[in-house]
Image: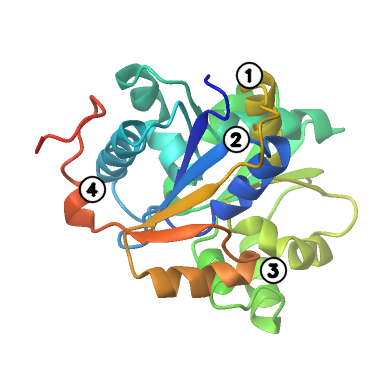
Amino acid sequence: MSDRGLIGVFDSGVGGLTVLKALRRALPHHDFLYLGDTARVPYGRKPPEMVKGFAQEITAFLAERGAEAIMVACNTATAVALPDLQADFEIPIWGVINPGVEAAVRATRTGRVGVIGTRGTISSGAYQRRLEACGMTVWAQACPLFVHLVEEGLADSPEAEVLVRHYVGGRPDIDTLILGCTHYPVLAPVINRVLGPGVALVESASVAAESLRTALGDSENGNGSITHFVTGDPIAYEHTAAVIGGVEGEIIALPVSDLKTYSPAGTSSSR
């Protein structure tokens, strides 16, 4: 990559900001483009082919804007679209599932691992297949209401604890749980309280960031910048993002109608 090479990061909304923060800690001198597709959130309930199309448009947009590498910060998009993206684009593209699996395999003592995520992520089987290939015994559970809890600022509320108990109450004996959605680390305190100290919680952001740092290296040329593109309302985006630590950098509105003009070749079909 060039000096201070530009890295693209995208998610269906604000959850990927947890990944962006980890990337910024690991690669503080790189410049970043973050795209939050808030006009079409959530991805987890949408058909896989639709999510693949969204991911293709976003990756093409980021590539045309100069991204020399891309992190798919969305678990659902990673699960259903990453292989196609890696085949269709020449720039290196990473996802958040393999790092989460690697971290869980290192953390488990018994080989019994759980994973929670959106309906799209869990129904894809992406985590389950990778964990089983590593010899793990796997339990998986979709938790579709967790994202709403986080974005409504209810992550440490009585309602959150009720929902956590609802979703994980029927779990088998596991000693490690993957938080398979970028919003879920915000719920880690209440999940810890419900599961107790015998279950290690694993999230992929820090592992994914270290993977990129190893692959790309970091520049020492000044402090990197962040530019956010948002397909929904920028004010709502900034407000929701405040729940998970806020937004650093410029926020630019990007109409979905403009995003749809981008093709897998990385160039706008309208040009």
Q: Circle 4 sits on which residue?
A: 259
What's under tag 3, amino acid-wise?
Arg
Q: Residue furthest left?
A: 270
Q: Residues within 10 Å of mark 4 (few under 14, many from 20)?
A: some
| Residue 141 can be seen in this image | no
Q: Residue furthest bottom?
A: 158
Residue drawn at the location 58% of the way across and 52% of the way down: 182
Instruction: Locate residue 242, reporting x and y percent.
Output: 59, 71
Q: CA distance from mark 3 to mark 4?
A: 39 Å
Q: Residues within 10 Å of mark 2 (few under 14, many from 20)?
A: many
Q: Which mark is residue 215?
A: 1
Residue drawn at the location 72% of the way across and 43% of the way down: 25
What's under tag 1, amino acid-wise?
Ala
Q: Residue furthest right?
A: 197
**Where does the C terminus fall, quadrant-wise?**
top left
Q: Nearer the viewer, mark 2 or mark 1?
A: 2
The foreground one among 117 and 209 is 209
Instruction: Locate residue 203, reporting x and y percent.
Output: 69, 45
Sequence-wise, which precedes: disc 3 or disc 1?
3
Find numbered disc 3 in the image and state the secondary structure of the residue it sits on. Answer: helix
Taking 27 as reference, is 51 above or below it?
A: below
Sequence-wise, which precedes: disc 1 or disc 4?
1
Q: Nearer the viewer, mark 2 or mark 4?
A: 2
Q: Residue furthest front?
A: 222
Find numbered disc 2 in the image and state the secondary structure of the residue it sits on. Answer: loop
Q: Nearer the viewer, mark 3 or mark 2?
A: 2
Sequence-wise, which precedes: disc 2 or disc 1?
2
Q: Given contact means CB atoms under 8 Å apart, are the residues at marks 3 and 2 in contact?
A: no
Instruction: Locate residue 240, reporting x and y percent.
Output: 51, 72
Q: CA distance from mark 1 to mark 4?
A: 29 Å
